[in-house]
Amino acid sequence: MKCNLCPRKCGADREHGQIGYCGMGSKVTASRASLHMWEEPCISGNGGSGTIFFSGCNLRCVFCQNREIASGGKGIEISTQRLSEIFIEQQERGAENINLVTPGHFAGRIREALVNAKEQGLIIPVVYNTSSYESADTLQQFEGLIDIYLADFKYMSSKMSARYSSAPDYAKIAKEAVAKMVHQTGAPEFDKSGIMRKGVIVRHLMLPGGLKDSKAVLRYLYRTYRDTIYYSIMNQYTPINIPEEYSEINRHVSEREYEDLIRYAVSLGIENGFVQEGDTAQESFIPDFDGKGIVRE
């Protein structure tokens, strides 16, 4: 059976041993399941977000902070039943939600695991944490199962998305994907503690020298969705092992660049949003992909 789960439509027969563009075969592969305190405040809360980091990715971002699992092949193969157990274990640890990080290429098995876990008592919200380089048909499989989409919108420029992520059609795909996400979840909802229960947060990571494109991303999002989504404008770009031919992004985002973008967001009218303060561009914020929480203890 040819794999068409993502916009690459690579056609790999993953069920019979072939490896897809995402770098993965048929079995769910994950590298860490833990309580993560560094998501947006309405996601992490006091208890932490119950993240499950899946291995593999359908983008090829030259600045990827998670490259050892995105393209490095690191991770542990687990059954669908074990994945259901992990969801329940995260809930028992006091997680505010289940946070599925880069899940699209395992869509069918994750969907099955979620259904099983909900039958076994999973009641906390489920977060789909994605690059937004997603097929709308694949997202449709999660109708009624996902409460919150934590979605990137990386680029508007096809030149930039081709150069840095090998995806010249990124903006077109992301527009369609975010539209599907908003349609599924509706308007944002929060509990009395300020924890998001339903809705869409769109993240934008500013790149060095990328102010013009970052403005274009925010302009498109706000003109399209206004206050029906939340915006997360990030300055935590961390240049780690950037290839020499991409020297123009081998630096941190300057304070002035980021402040210019925030001022632009305010001028657009964006109020429902998150900004980052202080020194967030640190390697220390990158998790240790050591298999924690994946194998039953």
Image: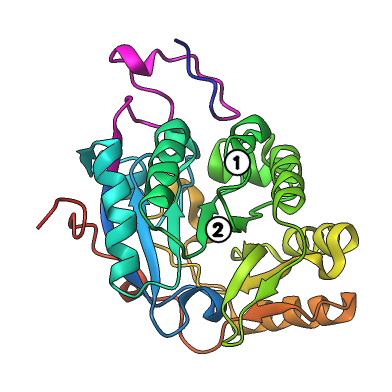
Name the residue located 71 percent from the left edge and 49 percent from the top edge.
184
Magenta-highlighted residues: 6-29
Report if residue 10 lies within the magenta region.
yes
Q: In screen coordinates, is 59 left or right of 197?
A: left
Instruction: Please say if 96 is above or below 156.
Output: below
Callout 2 secondary element = helix
Give x and y (percent) for residue 263: 79, 83
Res. 91 visible in picture: yes
Res. 243 visible in picture: no
Instruction: Give the crowd class for mark 2: few <14, some 14-19, many >=20 residues within 10 Å.
Output: few
Q: Nearer the viewer, mark 2 or mark 1?
A: 1
Q: Which amino acid type corresponds to the residue marked 1 in the rendered image?
A: Tyr
Q: Which amino acid type corresponds to the residue marked 2 in the rendered image?
A: Glu
Q: Which residue is mark 2?
A: 248
Label located before the other in sequence (2 or 1): 1
Q: Which residue is mark 1?
A: 133
Callout 1 secondary element = loop
Which secondary structure class fits the magenta region best?
A: loop
Name the residue located 63 percent from the left edge and 42 percent from the top edge.
143
